[in-house]
Amino acid sequence: MIDRLFALFVRVPLRTALLTLLAAALIALGVASYLERRQVRTLNASVANVSGNLAALEERLGTLSSETSDTASSTANLAADLAASSRAETAALKSQGSALQTAVAVATPGVVSIVALDASGQQAAAGTGFFVRATGYIVTNRHVVEDSTLSYTVITASGRQEPATVLWLSPSEDLAIVKVPD
């Protein structure tokens, strides 16, 4: 290969050889620029697709939030009493009538308490959420889990305690998704 290039330079005037090399370099730059623009278009399309999926998820979570706001607000007061008694006892104490007791009993298996703990293990805050998937996904309010310096524990209706990982916080709605191990 080097022999051919040398032979080419020996036979071709230096100016022609330099112009040929310059033309080859410009063609290589043009091809590289074309490939880069193509990659940018592909990445932009992927970003638009992800943005659309995120918007659809936010819309669905908004729908779920409005459908469950009554259940969440009726159980919010129960979270503080979990340390002293079981959820069933708390529901019975807080309930004033049989209709409320029935509603709490039906919703209780899907409703969880979320406890925020500081670095020393002391309770810093508490809130509620509900399972949306049997695989451990829970929807709660963003304000319950938005402090990244705290660790979160989920307490289920059966009293089981699981560490929770915050997966998503809505930038515009008071919604969040956390996950506990399956």
Image (cartoon, grey):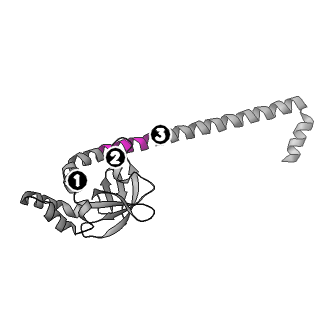
> Which label lies toward us, 3 or 1?
1
Give the residue type that dot 3 points to: Ala
- List x then y, in percent, for residue 39: 56, 41
- Range of residues picked out in magenta: 47-60
Which residue position is annotated with label 1? 72
Task: Using residue 169 as the reference point, say whether residue 105 is left or right of it.
Answer: left
Instruction: Identify which residue is drawn at 86% across, 42% down.
Output: 5
Spatial CA distance of label 3 from label 1 is 38 Å
Q: Residues within 10 Å of mark 3 (few under 14, many from 20)?
A: few
Spatial CA distance of label 2 from label 1 is 20 Å
Between discs 3 and 1, the one toward the N terminus: 3
The correct choice, above or below, for 60 with respect to 16 in the image is below
Give the residue type that dot 1 points to: Ala
Which residue position is annotated with label 2? 57
Spatial CA distance of label 3 from label 2 is 18 Å
Instruction: Identify which residue is drawn at 45% across, 56% down.
Output: 149
- List x then y, in percent, for residue 10: 92, 37
Which residue position is annotated with label 3? 45
Give the residue type that dot 2 points to: Leu
Residue 25 quadrant: top right
Q: Does the magenta stretch include residue 11?
A: no
The correct choice, above or below, for 145 with respect to 44 in the image is below
Residue at disc 1, secondary structure? helix
